[in-house]
């Protein structure tokens, strides 16, 4: 997840918005004006579970002279994950599953972008790329890459009335295999009622307004 604001910062830098000393640009996830949401889907033979997480924060810094080394992180609070069933949510937070008490957050520490392609259309800049870095879940950290699509609009074009810097919509999706992060759950549940891999879909809104 989305991982994703890294590309936001990249685009902000190319457009020269809110540039800091040394040519660096800061980008934050804007939770006040927009509804940031990450969706998770477990598809198992006996049950399909669809939920969301909204406790999202993040910040990225980029040097416009060295875009590939953009870095930052996205953090999601485990207790903000909701599946539509409070009893099931309590199980998800428990030691048997995500162990929220000892591992309260899920983090994607982004190290860079690769395979960047930029398209300008109708006054908007759209970037397709792969963000890569370290994903931490359940106290386990693994390398992760995710395809991202970012639609970026300069404040002067479409968001001038909002007054919170240049605007972007960031979208991504990827899979997380539970066994890779030592999430075993109750015996016999993973693979029958809970999918072995969880699909993640993220839609995040960012702004280049530093300090907003």
Image (tube, rainbow, N blue to C red):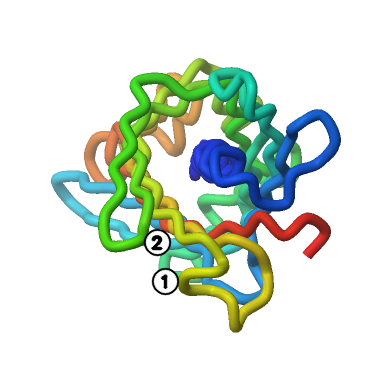
Question: Is disc 1 in contact with disc 2, using a CB cutoff of under 8 Å?
Answer: yes
Which residue is at 66% across, 55% downward? Answer: 208
x then y, percent, for residue 78 = 61, 51
- Dot 2 lies on which element? strand
Q: Quadrant of the C terminus?
A: bottom right
Give the residue pinned by disc 1.
Answer: 84
Work out how far the residue at label 1 is from the one at label 2, CA to CA, in angstroms. 7 Å
In the rendered structure, find residue 51 and report the number of the disc placed on it: 2
Image-based side of 42 in relation to 45, left or right: right
Q: Residue furthest left?
A: 45
Image-based side of 100 in relation to 98, left or right: right
Residue sitting nearer the eye, 14 or 139:
14
Query: Mark 1, residues whose alpha carbon is within 10 Å: few (<14), some, or many (≥20)?
Result: few
x then y, percent, for residue 87 = 50, 66
Residue sitting nearer the eye, 155 or 87:
155
Image-based side of 62 in relation to 11, left or right: right
Residue sitting nearer the eye, 77 or 69:
69
């Amino acid at each position: 997840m989305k991982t994703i604001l890294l590309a936001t910062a990249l685009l902000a830098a190319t457009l020269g918005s809110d540039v800091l000393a040394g040519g660096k640009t800061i980008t934050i996830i804007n939770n006040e004006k927009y509804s940031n949401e990450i969706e998770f889907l477990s598809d198992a033979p006996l049950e399909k579970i669809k939920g969301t997480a909204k406790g999202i924060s993040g910040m990225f810094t980029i040097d416009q002279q060295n875009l590939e080394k953009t870095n930052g992180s996205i953090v999601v609070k485990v207790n903000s994950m909701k599946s539509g069933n409070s009893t099931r949510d309590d199980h998800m937070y428990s030691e048997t599953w995500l162990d929220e008490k000892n591992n309260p957050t899920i983090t994607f520490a982004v190290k860079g972008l690769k395979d960047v392609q930029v398209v300008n259309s109708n006054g908007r800049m759209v970037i397709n790329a792969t963000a890569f870095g370290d994903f931490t879940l359940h106290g386990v950290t693994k390398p992760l890459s995710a395809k991202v699509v970012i639609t970026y609009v300069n404040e002067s074009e479409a968001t001038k009335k909002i007054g919170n810097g240049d605007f972007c919509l960031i979208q991504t999706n990827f899979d997380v295999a539970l066994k890779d992060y030592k999430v075993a759950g109750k015996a016999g549940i993973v693979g029958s009622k809970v999918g072995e891999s969880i699909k993640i879909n993220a839609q995040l809104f960012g702004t280049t307004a530093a300090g907003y």
